[in-house]
Amino acid sequence: MNLRNVAIIAHVDHGKTTLVDQLFRQSGTFRENQRVEERAMDSNDLEKERGITILAKCTSVEWEHDGTTTHINIVDTPGHADFGAEVERILSMVDGVILLVDAAEGPMPQTKFVTGKALALGLKPIVVVNKIDRPDARPAEVLDEVFELFLNLEANDEQLDFPTLYASGRAGYAGREDSVREGDLTPLFETIVSHVPSPGLNPEGEFKMLATLLDRDPFLGRILTGRIESGRLDVNMPIKAIDVDGNKVEDGRATKVFAFRGLERVPVESAQAGDIVAIAGLVNATVSNTIADPAVSEPLHARPIDPPTLAMSFSVNDSPYAGRDGDKVQSRVIRERLEREAEGNVAIRVTTASDNDSYEVAGRGELQLGVVIETLRREGFELSISRPRVLFRDGPNGREEPYETVVIDVDDEFSGTVIDKMAIRKAEMTDMRPSGAARPA
């Protein structure tokens, strides 16, 4: 069976998760009479309510054409900057990317950030201009903007020769001309199979896999997801975890091996190089560790986990209204829940304050910390939360502080006010140019 591993890159609300839903439906992953909620990949309640993807997820479809079945592993990735580190790690386990761009809005700042990482890894893009049926769609201009973006990101000649499709994810059709208004997603399936290379990894070598995602199961413990880079993995096979420096983290066995079939994680007896799998059986291994045969001593190259930039204090609710909205109010219960969160979410860090009754939770941004707070609130926890504070660190030239790269698209008449407001916040303007229709960026 042929195999393809592909990630979907898009800005917030450009239709990524909706398009994946249609790929499920048209590949037969869902039965015709099966009741499935819209945007099925956004399984978290907060994802459904906010209309964004928070958790990266792996899934797969099988597409049959001319008597050949192609297994396509699809990774649906977050589009918000606070979850950008997850996107970058995921790109290491795919062989191609689908860049999804809104036919009216065009490529956006977060698109630029993630696409730059994908191009730097040498991945070949497929450009899908989505929402082609919008009344304000401008597909020709958007395609020019994408090409200019690739030039600015120093794409090579092979990457600049990208295939382009025009689609409506909600209506479930795609075509090679911007006049398309009906049909199905067959052109997209065909382009994935023809343009994205198969993994081409060594199935005969020693087993090696880079842990890319981590979550926790109440029955199985830690579950590590990644792509097998070489060799073969069998259930109950001895394995070990080593860190980025080659130091052994732990020895263990692959008690369970899961492959992705549609929305489900399905147990399998074995997997080989190129497959994206999830492994249970290790208790200390984490993201960026190499999971390998016991004879392996050299780790796979891994991108380090980005350090937190903001921190908030979580403490017991000692107000007069304590206990009215939740039943989990004790310091010990809060600590255990935060430690469990930090185990599965490697982008946050939890430390105990000197008074032993409050905890500092550090993360990549306000949205990420806000998601943690809202998740705990819905589980019945009551907390007192401090204002966010910026985390500094000591560097070779003294104290260093985190910074964000901001792109603002604004009408000419407001540019002076925006520049003043940003200067008050210690911003430094590095570039200003018109972005069309008398709007500087």
Image: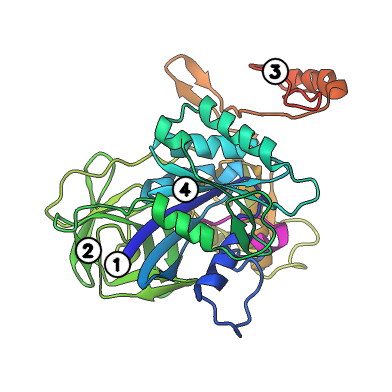
Q: Which of marks 1 and 3 is nearer the N terminus?
A: 1
The residue that appears at 69% across and 53% down in the rendered structure is: 131
- Per the model, the C-alpha gap separating discs 3 and 4 is 30 Å
Amino acid type at circle 1 is Gly
How crowded is the residue under tag 3: few (<14 C-alpha within 10 Å), some, or many (20+)? few
The nearer-to-camera label among 1 and 3 is: 3
Residue linked to disc 3: 432
The N terminus appears in which quarter of the rendering? bottom left
The nearer-to-camera label among 4 and 1 is: 4
Query: Is residue 372 shown above or below 125?
Result: below
Q: Is residue 277 visible?
A: yes
- Per the model, the C-alpha gap separating discs 1 and 2 is 6 Å
- Give x and y (percent) for residue 328: 64, 67
Q: Which of marks 2 and 3 is nearer the N terminus?
A: 2
Amino acid type at circle 3 is Met
Residue 437 belongs to magenta span: no
The nearer-to-camera label among 2 and 3 is: 3
- Give x and y (percent) for residue 125: 47, 43
Query: Is residue 340 shown above or below 109?
Result: below
**View extreme (top): residue:** 397
Which image quadrant is residue 323 in? bottom right
The residue that appears at 42% across and 61% down in the rendered structure is: 73
Pointers 3 and 4 in contact (C-beta within 8 Å): no
- The dot on residue 281 is 1
Pointers 1 and 2 in contact (C-beta within 8 Å): yes
Q: Which of marks 1 and 2 is nearer the N terminus?
A: 2
Amino acid type at circle 2 is Gly
Residue linked to disc 4: 97
- Per the model, the C-alpha gap separating discs 1 and 3 is 52 Å
Q: What stretch is highlighted in magenta?
A: 46-56
Residue linked to disc 2: 252
Q: In this view, does 392 lie to the left or right of 74?
A: right
